[in-house]
Amino acid sequence: AQLDKYAKLAGLSYFGTAVDNPRLYNEQYMSVLQGSGEFGSLTPINAQKWKKTEEVQGVFTFAEADAIANTAKAGVGGMKTLRCHTMVWYKGLPSWVETTYSRDDMEKILAAHIQNLAQYFKGRCYAWDVVNEAIDENGVFRQSPMYKAMGLDFITFSFKTAAKADPGAKLYYNDYALESPSLSTGPKISITLAMLRTVKAQGGTVHGVGFQSHLKVGLVPARAEIVNTMQQFLEVVDEVAITELDIRHSPLKVPSTREMWNAQARDYGEVVGACLDVNKGYGGRKCVGVTLWDFTDKYSWVPSEIPTEGEACMWDNNYVKKPAYWTVLNMFKAY
Ligand code: G3I
């Protein structure tokens, strides 16, 4: 049983997971991550973020990110695809960035950061999440230090700089609550589409849009709805991907029941199924792959950020595959 193998047969380029560095020392975790052939792609959860790579201005540290990249190379079944995450985000910033800069100074700061990341990982990243989460749920640009200094131009500038520094990587805009209008309280989708059109009109290179897909059981948009949204983005960019998939119980009732896990499995099927359907519609690979935001509940980000919610992953706390795993695998096999 290998998700990546059957995902490829169903028309995707990869099925992957995200991983954070402390887990590389957990044998049980690693035996699933590397030894099972389930995953054909990895994304570093934190290792490439600004705070980890340039905590002190001008001093770049890549040891943690290298550890993930090397893990990807060594995987059973060829975990060849590295999705790189992320160059410019309003979170995970070192304190020296979290202050007020002039436009000129911010340009220099962004250029140095992006060039260093892109050049260091050149040839190793299938894709880069160049800009992450620039617009909030109300469709309003987040007041990040980058936005405050440069307005929307920070996005164009980031994509232009990344394209020059690593012309071989697919450059993505990555965000959550883009899967359907029902997931945001404002016009997030239309504002994001307009932003992408502006960035491209200004000469920025954007190849892809990442649908993070941090979703809640019972509140997952229908498959056709997600397809519809992806199609709207495919009018502006060449490809889309599901980049941070997890579907949490909200609120989480303990102990969880079979019904809860079955409902979660159906929801996983809707999201992954949408990616397959998009490709069918275009007669080609447009939704290129699916990445889990970690595969086991043991290391999910959810309970630490939202203590009343959780059990969002396809594997449980003890590395046992949940119904979601079998639903997705069987869907790939049947496709
Ligand atoms: O490494 C330090 C550790 O030394 C310290 O003792 C500890 C105390 O708080 O913090 C540790 O760093 C934490 C890091 O995760 C590693 O565990 C940070 O505080 C914490 O903020 C960080 O959270 C990450 C979060 O992004 C913010 O960067 C989550 O692991 C990660 O799953 C989450 O991922 C994001 C995506 O990048 C973008 N989309 C949403 C997604 C979920 O929030």
Image: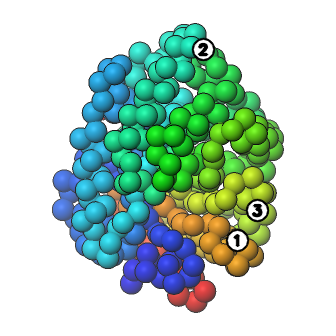
Q: How is the image coloured?
A: rainbow
Upstream in the sequence, badge 2 or badge 3?
2
Residue at (54, 53) in percent of width and height: 170
Quadrant of residue 274 within the rendered picture? bottom right
Residue at (76, 43) in percent of width and height: 197
Q: Which residue is mark 2?
A: 103
Quadrant of residue 134 within the rendered picture? top right
Q: Which residue is mark 3?
A: 231
From this view, report whether residue 163 is shown above or below residue 18.
above
Q: Indicate the quadrant containing the N terminus: top left, top right, bottom left or bottom right.
A: bottom left
Mark yes or no: residue 204 visible: yes
Secondary structure found at label 1: helix
What is the three-letter code of the residue carrying label 1?
Answer: Val
Q: Which residue is mark 1?
A: 278
In this picture, residue 300 sits left or right of residue 229:
left
Give the distance between the C-alpha atoms of the residues marked 2 and 3, in whole angstroms: 35 Å
Give the distance between the C-alpha atoms of the residues marked 3 and 1, in whole angstroms: 7 Å
Please tell me which residue lies in front, 245 or 172: 172
Residue 201 drawn at (x, y percent): 76, 39
Front: mark 1 or 2: 2
Upstream in the sequence, badge 1 or badge 2?
2
